[in-house]
Amino acid sequence: MDPYDVTIDAGGRRASGLRYGTLADDHAAFTAELRAGWSEMSPLPYEEFAAPYLEFRRTLLEGCELLGEHLRHSGAGQVVMAEVNTLAERTAEAGVEAGVEAAREARA
């Protein structure tokens, strides 16, 4: 296999990035429903259990929000890289075509 023979699937990468965005939207909706379903009061009657439980819920929600941000960021990165790959592929093709033309002129 020629190491310079690389196929770039920019369309697939872009589609993947857009799917990450959809996943981030779904995850944000899940997190909002989770937050709305919990009140600020602890469902546990004992303070020894209530405080750690409330801390656990707060940490879980923060983790959910952070995951949503990472999903969105990853998707946006995939879309940007698809554009960069497309530009690189076009530039490489133009360079090859220019090299072929220069070789033809040199032979003539």
Image: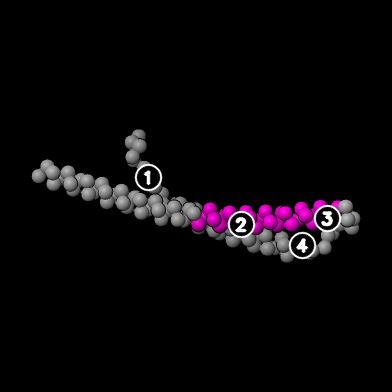
Residue range in magenta is: 49-76
Badge 4 or badge 1: first in the primary sequence: 1
Quickly name the residue at label 2. 68
Question: Considering only order in the chain, which callout, 3 or 2, is on the residue closer to the N terminus?
Answer: 3
Residue 99 on the magenta span: no
User: What amino acid type is highlighted by mark number 3?
Assistant: Ala
Residue at 82% across, 63% down: 41
Estimate how packed mark 4 is, as few (under 14), some (14 to 19) or many (20 or more) residues with alpha carbons within 10 Å: few
Look at label 2 and name its amino acid.
Gly
Location of residue 23 by image quarter: bottom right
Residue 19, horizontal then vertical, whole percent:
52, 56
Residue identifier under label 1 = 7
Secondary structure of the residue carrying numbered label 4 = loop
23 displayed left or right of 32: left
**Which numbered disc flags the more N-terminal residue, 2 or 1?**
1
Determine the secondary structure under disc 3: helix
Locate the N terminus by quadrant.
top left
Answer yes or no: do the residues labelled 2 and 1 have beta carbons within 8 Å?
A: no
Residue 12: percent from left, percent from top? 45, 51
Q: How many residues crowd around disc 3 within 10 Å: few (fewer than 14), some, or many (20 or more)?
A: few
Most extreme residue toward the left, as rendered? Answer: 108
Residue 23 seen from this side = no
Which residue occupies 66% across, 55% down? 64
